[in-house]
Amino acid sequence: MHVKHPLRLSSNLSEINVTPLVDVMLVLLIIFMVTAPMMQSGINVNLPSAETKTNPSSGGLVLTITKDHYIFMENRNINLYLLESRLKSYFHNKREKVVFLKADKSVSYGYVISALDIIKKAGIEKVGIIVKKK
């Protein structure tokens, strides 16, 4: 009587072909290499020019107003009417309340002032304006 060993695998099951796996991984690597720089571009705003350049320091919140009057807070679109409550909740337990405003140069002065008014109503006393250097 001939008994087969129960732990022995046949030779065709023990060989795994890794070529398709490597091909898929290389394609994914190329896709991520191409799309990664596009994801870091941020919000496109045409800043007004000034003689002095201001850059946001660490610890401040950057609010961006696009030419279409969209307001972005941390790369999320915020409605102008909800801005005050969002700012209050963002700065709830923070000691230093600093906001940097980054507005497109084609946005009307009145709209920027209304956004500044809401920022002041939220209790933020330090507001900086971001511009590009001439």
Image: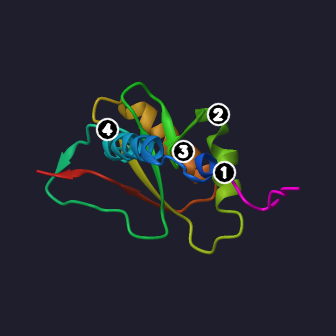
Number of other residues with Cα within 10 Å of mark 1, as a class: few under 14, some 14 to 19, many 20 or more? few
User: Label 2 sits on what residue type?
Assistant: Tyr
Looking at the image, residue 7 sits to the left or right of residue 88; the answer is: right
Coordinates of residue 46 in the picture (x, y in percent): 26, 37
Which residue in the protein does label 3 denote?
117
Which span of residues is magenta-colored? 1-10
Residue at mark 3 to residue at mark 4: CA–CA distance = 21 Å
Secondary structure of residue under mark 3:
helix
Residue at mark 4 to residue at mark 2: CA–CA distance = 22 Å
Furthest-right residue in this view:
1
Which residue in the protein does label 2 denote?
81
Which residue in the protein does label 4 denote?
45
128 inside magenta stretch:
no
Q: Which of marks 4 and 1 is in front?
A: 1
Toward the viewer: 118 or 3? 3
Of marks 3 and 1, which one's residue comes earlier in the chain?
1
Of marks 2 and 1, which one's residue comes earlier in the chain?
1
User: Label 1 sits on what residue type?
Assistant: Ser
Q: Which of marks 3 and 2 is in front?
A: 2
Of marks 4 and 2, which one's residue comes earlier in the chain?
4
User: Label 3 sits on what residue type?
Assistant: Asp
Coordinates of residue 100 in the picture (x, y in percent): 43, 56
For the stretch drawn in magenta, what is the main secondary structure? loop
